[in-house]
Image (cartoon, helix red, strand yellow):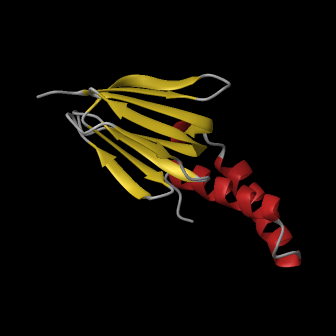
């Protein structure tokens, strides 16, 4: 069976690359699942989304992805994230602290856009790490 060639990059570094059977990402148009031989597509990733890469051995790679694009063509999937972090790299305590600070700022000023974005990012980081949010 055909495999997808995946590359996940941010301006800072290459997050992950390899082969997989499926990629699931959240775009501004909704969640999208990509399997081998998928039609070409270009999507805009949401702020504070979670990317899932399912590999053939039943293993799943999970990453918090904050904005960017996903491009699919000829079984090549490129995820160009504004920033991203593998779930295994997340400092759970720091992410929980960031979420609490952001939520406190939102409670004080419901129109604080920076705090709302920070809350989305912290939630994504916690979900990528396998934590309940």
Q: Report the front residue among 13 and 79.
A: 79
Instruction: Report the residue that reaches farthest toward the left.
Output: 1
Q: Residue furthest right?
A: 108
113 to 72, vertically: above or below: below
Q: Quadrant of the N terminus?
A: top left
The x and y percentages for residue 86 are 54, 37
Q: Residue at x 22, y 27 (%)?
A: 3
Quarter of the image with the C terminus is bottom right
Number of numbered markers: 0
38 and 92: which one is in front? 38
Task: State the residue at coordinates (28%, 34%).
Answer: 55
From the top left corner, tell me how far across and down residue 47 is, in percent.
61, 52
Q: Is residue 59 left or right of residue 102?
A: left
Say left or right for 129 vs 23: right
Horizontal placement of 114 versus 120: left or right? right
Q: Position of residue 87 (x, y in %)?
A: 53, 42
Residue located 53% across and 64% down the image: 132
Residue drawn at x 74%, y 56% as measured from the top left? 118
120 sits left or right of 110 in the view: left
Query: Does residue 99 lie above or below 61 as drawn?
Result: below
Residue 130, compared with residue 68, is above or below; it is: below
The image shows residue 128 at horizontal and vertical percentages of 52, 49
């Amino acid at each position: 069976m055909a495999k997808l060639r995946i590359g996940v990059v941010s301006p800072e570094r290459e997050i992950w690359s390899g082969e997989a059977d499926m990629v699931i990402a959240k775009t501004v148009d909704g969640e999208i699942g990509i399997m081998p031989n998928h039609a070409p597509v270009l999507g805009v990733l949401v702020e504070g989304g979670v990317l899932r890469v399912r590999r053939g051995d039943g293993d799943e790679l999970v990453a918090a992805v904050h904005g960017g694009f996903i491009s699919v063509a000829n079984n090549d999937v490129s995820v160009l994230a504004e920033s991203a972090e593998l779930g295994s790299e997340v400092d759970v305590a720091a992410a929980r602290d960031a979420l609490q600070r952001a939520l406190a700022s939102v409670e004080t000023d419901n129109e604080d856009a920076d705090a709302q974005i920070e809350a989305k990012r912290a939630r994504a980081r916690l979900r990528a790490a396998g934590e309940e949010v």
